[in-house]
Amino acid sequence: MRAATIVALVAVGVSATACAPSAMPATSAKLETPVAPSVVASDAGSVDAGDAVDASAMVTLDALAARATSVAAGMREAARGEIAGDAAGATNATTATRVIARADDRDVCVRVTMVARPAAHAWLADTRGDVLSDAAEATDATLGARGPVCVRKGDVVSLHLESKTPFVARFVAWQSP
């Protein structure tokens, strides 16, 4: 019985320190290996480079923010917005970038939920361009799906979107602390 109590206390201690800043590695290496996030494949069909994208049928920013309880419990909203990308043509991809969080005075962890029409490649990157989380050709994805992605003090997390066709994407980002 005493051994079971000690094991339980050790397990609680390990889980309590898992998200503490002191538990983060001292190196500036990637803190999350890119994993396959929750992604819904696009069935929106192809869009010609000259077509405008109708964003009226997309999930609203408020509806994305309402996912906080299941996606980012305990985190605060850091950013939300809409990004439109106009592709230059069939052989050139358009990339749009938005800064999501700045780790000015402490380490920061983030999660992002996004929807796009049509599907777009989405990823989170730090200042050096290291990919922190990735969703290939997604219409609805959570970046940092298996846990928040984190950066050290002084770093920045940016959302990147890329498509060969014009696209519109909406996102909500949460961060802690």
Image (tube, rainbow, N blue to C red):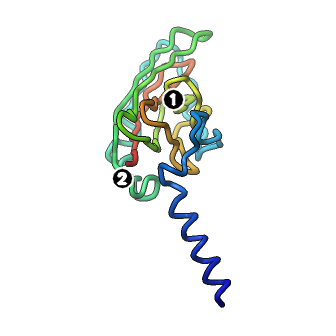
Residue at 58% across / 28% down in the picture? Answer: 130
- What label sits on residue 126 in the rendered view? 1
Q: Position of residue 90 (x, y in %)?
A: 60, 11
User: What element does badge 1 sit on?
Assistant: loop
Which residue in the structure is indicated by mark 2?
A: 66
| Quarter of the figure with the N terminus | bottom right
Q: Nearer the viewer, residue 106 or 52?
A: 106
- What label sits on residue 34 in the rendered view? none
Q: Position of residue 101 (x, y in %)?
A: 39, 35
Q: Nearer the viewer, residue 54 or 154?
A: 154
Residue at 46% across / 44% down in the picture? Answer: 109
Q: Nearer the viewer, residue 3 or 170?
A: 3
Residue at 38% across / 31% down in the picture? Answer: 55
| Whole-number angstrom distance, CA of label 2 to CA of label 1 | 26 Å
Q: Position of residue 39 (x, y in %)?
A: 59, 43
Is residue 135 in sight in this rendering?
no
Q: Position of residue 162 (x, y in %)?
A: 54, 23
Q: In the rendered view, would you say 117 is above or below 16?
A: above
User: What element does badge 2 sit on?
Assistant: loop
Crowd tier of the residue under label 2, counting other residues whose Cα lies within 10 Å: few below 14, some 14–19, many 20 or above: few
Q: In the rendered view, would you say 147 is above or below 137?
A: below
The quadrant holding residue 92 is top right
